[in-house]
Image (tube, rainbow, N blue to C red):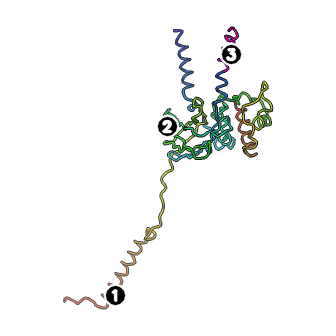
Amino acid sequence: MRAVPALLALLALTACGSDDARRSQPAPKGDPGLKVWVAQGCGSCHTFAPAGATATIGPNLGLSLGGRSRDYIRESIVAPNARVPGGGTSIMPADFAKRISKPELDALVKFVAQGVRAH
Amino acid sequence: MRRLLLILPLLLLTAPAVAHAGGFATTGLSSTPEGLRAGQPWKVELTILQHGRTPLSALRPEIVTLDADGNRTTFRAKPTGRAGHYAATVRFPKAGQWSYAVYDGFNNAAPTTYPAVLIRSPAPATTVRRPDPVGPPGLPIALAGVLLLGGVGVWLMHRRRHPPASLA
């Protein structure tokens, strides 16, 4: 009998992990920040629920950026080595300021900030 | 020998981290399928960069779609000729909520996932209103009426000029 709850928990865990794509919820319609996120491949490294992203190369943004200002988020994107928690060097590319325009960056910062707040 | 025994577990522990650090790529998409209707093609270009920097060629990336019932369909992306760029055409055959993910062909253990999208019903067949070649719907009746009246008028005039011969 003891084994039943454990088995149920295991089944629940495997069901959750069976397909990442199935877990995501519809995104806010036409969000320009999400478009930048998708175009730049941010979801290949980060977990971020509002973007349906589940990658684990970089930090989970819902956790690492919780309570941070928009300026901090902007700096984390354009200068990822400025403040690496625990020191060291970030593996995140440091040239996003060159890759994306200012309006795109603004939209991305807004999208991430709103998503972090909702986390 | 003791040192080796101490170092070996350390090497085994750090090896996966090192392998992981060298084995990731980012996948950027030129568009999302948002706003599409069922059956409409989603033409999308993938940009795959190792470590988010170096274009990766000779990969076989795939886009996998998943409907609300969990049915998977795989769409192969083909190289465009530009390093790191691949193109795919994806179709969502029915309306409803769909999920999708990109397997970059470099590290397929970690697909890039996106928010689910709502695919709309196919556009209703548009009925083209062509101009009536004959004219308004009442025109034939009016013409028939005019012809009938004209005919009766002609008959009456003819009868007045040539009254029928009396049988008596």
In front of the other: label 3 or label 2? 3
Q: Read off the magenta span.
A: B1-14
Q: Quadrant of residue A16?
A: top right
Task: Look at the numbered disc 2 and give the secondary structure of its residue.
Answer: strand
Callout 1 amino acid: Met
Labelled disc at residue B157 = 1
Rendered residue at 19%/88% (across/down): B167
Callout 2 amino acid: Thr
Callout 3 amino acid: Leu
Q: Quadrant of residue B119?
A: top right
Rendered residue at 60%/30% (across/down): B110
Compared to residue B157, the image places residue B147 above or below, namely above
Contact (Cβ within 8 Å) of mark 2 with mark 1: no
Which numbered disc flags the more N-terminal residue, 2 or 1?
A: 2
Q: Position of residue B133 (x, y in %)?
A: 44, 69
Labelled disc at residue B73 = 2
Q: Chain of mark 3?
A: B
Labelled disc at residue B10 = 3
Distance, label 2 to label 1, CA atoms, is 82 Å
Compared to residue B80, the image places residue A57 above or below, namely above
Q: Residues within 10 Å of mark 2 (few under 14, many from 20)?
A: some
Which numbered disc flags the more N-terminal residue, 1 or 3?
A: 3
Q: Position of residue A46 (x, y in %)?
A: 67, 31
